[in-house]
Image: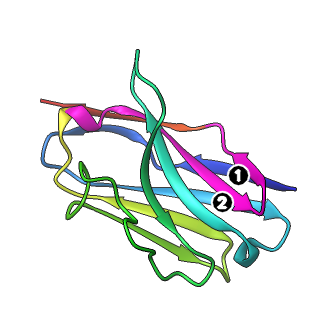
Amino acid sequence: QVQLVESGGGLVQAGGSLRLSCAASGRTFSAFAMAWFRQAPGKEREFVASINWSGINTYNAYADSVKGRFTISRDNAKSTLYLQMNSLKPEDTAVYYCKANYGARDYWGQGTQVTVSS
């Protein structure tokens, strides 16, 4: 079992930056593969970025729509996952969720809203 709490969302103008955080508690954070997903109004939840337990990104670690603009990272000592988002676009507006994966189990946070104004 792991509990996830996202933070860092907000309102930003197009071209701006935000850094999301996902604080984990419960089981050992370093045991989990982590990822960010997002869900825009009226759309399905979609993959954004992933990172394995060691902090090394796997192949296809980013959705094409965010490559070169977003960076996923983790600090296992702080049990925290990050998403640095630069050059934000209005189409990045969504609720952003972090996900922890351990074997067949997935755990989700409650999400944090990111709104990018044009």
Give the image quarter of residue 22: bottom right
Quick check: marks 2 and 1 in contact, CB under 8 Å? yes
Please tell me the numbered disc located at residue 105: none
Q: Which mark is residue 23?
A: 2
The residue tagged with tag 2: helix, strand or loop?
strand
| Secondary structure beneath label 1 | strand
Rounded to the nearest whole Å, what is the CA distance between mark 2 and mark 1? 6 Å
Closer to the chain start, of discs 2 and 1, is 1
Instruction: Examine the residues drawn in magenta and state their main secondary structure.
Output: strand
Residue receiving disc 1: 4
Query: Is residue 109 a member of the stretch shown in magenta?
Result: yes
Return the x and y of residue 57 as percentages of the image width and height. Answer: 44, 76
Which residue is rendered at x = 57% and y = 38% of the image? Answer: 111
Question: Residue 53 location in percent, x, y?
Answer: 63, 78
Could you tell me the amino acid type at mark 1? Leu
Residue occupying the point 78% across, 55% down? 104
